[in-house]
Image (cartoon, rainbow, N blue to C red):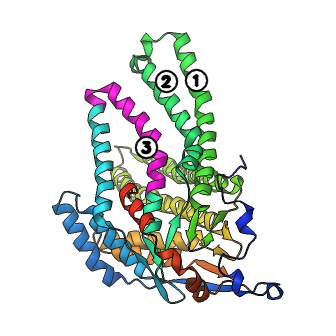
Amino acid sequence: MNDSPNDTDTDSSNEVPHGLADSLHPETVVAPVWREVPIQFTGQGKLYFRIWYVNLLLTLVTLGFYYPWAKAKRLRFFHSNTMLEGQPFEFHGDPKIMFRGYLIGLVLFIAYSVSANFAPVFHWSLILVFVAIYPLLVRSSRRFYMANTSWRGLKFQFTGSAKQAFLCYLPLIIGVAAWVLALFFVADLVSEPTEQASSAEKVRYLIGLSVAAPVSLAVWFWVNYRMVAYLQGHLAWGSLQSRFIGRWQAVVGYQIKTGLVYFGGVVLMFAPFIFFAVVVSLSADPSAPIMPKFAFGLSILMGLLFTVSVVALLSFVSAYYQSRKQNVIWNNTVHPHLRFVSDLRCKRLWLLRMKNWLLMVLTLGLYSPYAAMAIAKLRLESVTLETTLDFDQMLALGGRLKANVVGDAVTDIFDIDVGF
């Protein structure tokens, strides 16, 4: 399980980046000096508000077909306000190409929804087809996004191959295919009334489910780790190629801990409400005139507290998951001359989310663009880049990598954005 799907082995990881070695004397490469380059986000809510409400209006008027153009505008705004050494990132994605991926996703979703009622065999077959091509869709979307992102004129790249993507997802593909086939063949048994199924069939079904569930969960954790290593270990900018050095325990750990946090939160949340429910049931005595009023008022209070508790719990679980995920992934994405330090705190993210929820409720959703700016600023500025490189020198030596007409053409033809 420690095997990482990265193909970028140690040959390049122990060398000075290509092009820089010629300008350095061997005697000077003794102890590289690391310098910190903080990431800054300068986006303002009042400026993003204009983009947000126009995007929302046109998306609603066009019944969703304007979404790729809306997404492109949103990404351009976020990229142009993300600064590294005072220089902004840029997003060059063509909304027309993004629309192509949007249509593919829309057609698949409609076919999946319609076939469930009118063509069950085609419905299950479509699931198998989607599972089979999912690795290609993930790779294609990643390549499109990276190829259309640049800093100081030099575009990023994603170097992972289709073969590596399939190998990462192969256990999941096999597992999902087995589940789909099993559900297809036992559909009659599942749909039968419980009293019509024999005891042996019930036992066989429960045993199969109890074995399949934990095995499927273990396969998912394994595949998820390999997926993270694949996506983070093939990022490139100029001559720099990333590696992912995280162990599977770290990647799986934050997911398991998130599940435990959610379960513990649910227990803590329901305990006082069960107590209140018992109090209300005992106090609802018709012979006491004041008790029904007390019970009604307490019920209203319980409903409000329950709503607030649900929002607080979901916000905390989301903040815990996102903070741990960002820190684990980026702290383990490295290059011999470049590394990231992410220190996103769960408490700060959770309190900010709660504040955003409150203001969005009070403003009937109009605070949403301001909330997006606040979250982006906190998450991005929690990351610091540490490097030994002189980016000016690297850009001068690696500028020839910008003119890759064939690569850009292939990206435009075969790579699409399928994210929603």
Q: Earlier in the sequence, mark 2 or mark 1?
A: 2
Q: Amino acid at mark 1?
A: Gly
Please state the horizontal and vertical placement of residue 343, each as a whole percent of the image.
63, 74
Location of mark 1 (residue): 208
Q: Which mark is residue 182?
A: 2
What is the quadrant of residue 328 in the picture? Answer: bottom right
Q: Amino acid at mark 3?
A: Ser
Q: Nearer the viewer, mark 1 or mark 3?
A: 1
**Per the image, is 80 magenta?**
no
Left or right of residue 146: residue 325: right
Q: Nearer the viewer, mark 3 or mark 2?
A: 2
Seen at 66% across and 60% down, the residue is 8
Mark count: 3
Residue 77 relative to residue 32: left or right: left
- Magenta-tinted stretch: 116-140
Q: Position of residue 419 (x, y in %)?
A: 39, 57
Residue 281, label in figure = 3
